[in-house]
Amino acid sequence: MPEGHTIHRLAARHRAFFAGRAVQVASPQGRFAAGAARLDGLTLLDTEAYGKHLLHHFEGGATLHVHLGLYGKFADGEPPVPAPVGQVRMRMADERHWLELRGPTACEVLDPGLVAALRARLGQDPLRDDADPRIAYARIAAATRPLFALLMDQSIVAGCGLIYANEVLFRAGLSPTTPGSAIGAQRWDELWNDLRALMKEGVVQGRIDTVHTVHTPEAMRRAPRVDRHGGEVYVYRRPGQPCLVCGTAIARGPLAGRNLYWCPCCQASGDV
């Protein structure tokens, strides 16, 4: 599932394409026909990302809400608009650009009240300037669940996914199973600031890189990581491989229904 940096990149891209312009909206597949008819011909005012949710705000108060989920993806380009191939849930176009959406978990039109309800159930997004890490910390400090699970909880930290959760805990030297209630306020601030910096870099680069300069392939004279997710990481999807810091084999195990990766040495406990 795309993590928050990808959704923020999409919001910026779609804003550059269509903001301030009237657009044609259709549903070649038919599953979004009613929503497309409601938006067709309206002016797109702005786009916004909140966690893993993409919002397109139109004149008149209607908002297109998209959650890509595991299988959703966008494609875009310049005219001519190609003939639909496969299950195109939604198509948006004007005389300069087009985009297509396939396979999302959610593609719906929301009124302002439902948008407010969506925001209310989401946690703090590290990529948003209006985020308040103290609100997230209040939830974490009161929880006994593992910190890894809390970072993945979208009602606490919106936009943080599997890769960022694994990597930021390694960089902090914290065991992923550390209870949230064991984390002090200063330690949380450090964790939040590092997560925010990593995700902002992801927005700029379009991929997730988490290793420090001294651990890059060039600095260590090692082969670059080969993985469909791209990016240089410390633990994510590196089970059995040596830790880039201490050489210990990276471990893998299930937690909160997801794959957890960690270094048994570097993350033995951590100073909380």
Image (cartoon, grey):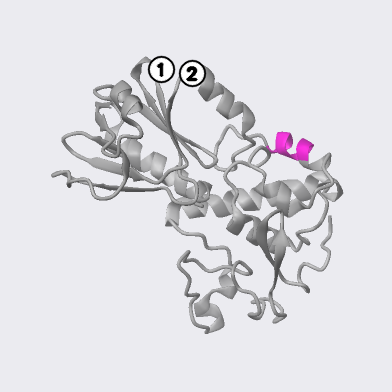
- Residue, far left: 80
Q: Quadrant of residue 238?
A: bottom right
Report the front residue among 218 and 39: 39
State the mark number for residue 112.
2
Residue located beneath label 1 in the image: 61
Q: In the image, is 182 to the left or to the right of 29?
A: right
Residue lying farthest top? 60
Q: Assess whether mark 1 and mark 2 are in contact (beta carbons under 8 angstroms).
A: yes
Instruction: Name the amino acid type tagged 2.
Output: Pro
Q: Which residues are magenta?
A: 133-139
Which residue sits at x=56%, y=70%? 213
Image quarter hosting the C terminus: bottom right
Q: Residue furthest bottom?
A: 221
Q: Is residue 260 above or below residue 67?
A: below
In terms of depth relative to the viewer, which is nearer, 103 or 59? 103
Identify the residue shown where x is 24% and y is 23%. Answer: 41
Q: Secondary structure at mark 2?
A: helix
Secondary structure under tag 1 reads helix
The image quarter containing residue 263 is: bottom right
